[in-house]
Image (cartoon, rainbow, N blue to C red):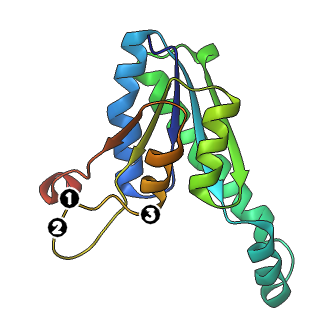
Amino acid sequence: MIARVLMAVDDSHESLQAARRAAPLAAGWGAAVRVLTVVGDHGVEQAIEDVTGPGTGARRHREAEQLLAHVVRQVQMAGVRADAVTSVVRAGPPARRIVEEARAWPADLVVMAVSDRRGVRSPYVGSETEHVLEFAPCPVLVVPSPPVADRQA
């Protein structure tokens, strides 16, 4: 039984499509959904702020919160009860944070997109997705990229 679905998202088209496709599944199962996004670690943010001035990290966190609010609305529109949807921003290496969240929450299923890849199509999921597939404590649903024609719609 799948009662807890962790949706790992970023601002890519592929990731948003994966969440959009998985939301009706979660609604049909009556599952709780946690939407997770991961921002860069503090060391990188500090280095950027050293060059650009303060506020970069806060701005990235606000943008992450806006992304999560958008996905949460989509999940609710798909039929998941509002009280069954939560969201969280984590900092650090994305794959490691996804696995940690899947363990800590604990998730019955992780949903994520295939990494975006330009050029010749070949079997490729990306290093982040590969890490999650290898170390997640539960099944992982990897949603393929939509066909190019669907991206333009």
Name the amino acid, label 1: Gln
Q: Residues within 10 Å of mark 2 (few under 14, many from 20)?
A: few
Location of residue 147 by image quarter: bottom left
Q: Which residue is mark 3?
A: 127
Name the amino acid, label 3: Ser
Disc 2 secondary structure class: loop
Q: Which dot marks residue 121?
A: 2
Say if 59 sits above or below 16 in the image.
below
Name the amino acid, label 2: Arg
Mark nearer the N terminus (3 vs 2): 2
**Residue at the (70%, 63%) spot, across then down:** 60
**Residue at the (20%, 76%) spot, across then down:** 119
Mark 1–mark 3 contact, CB under 8 Å?
no
Q: CA distance from mark 3 to mark 2?
A: 16 Å
Q: Which residue is mark 1?
A: 152
**Residue at the (23%, 56%) spot, across then down:** 151
Residue 65 is situated, as x and y percent measured from the top left of the image, at 67, 47
**Residue at the (83%, 71%) spot, across then down:** 55
Q: Where the N terminus falls, by quadrant?
A: top left
Q: CA distance from mark 1 to mark 3?
A: 26 Å
Residue 38 located left or right of residue 47: left
Location of residue 94 by image quarter: bottom right
Residue 133 is situated, as x and y percent measured from the top left of the image, at 43, 46
Q: Residues within 10 Å of mark 1 (few under 14, many from 20)?
A: few
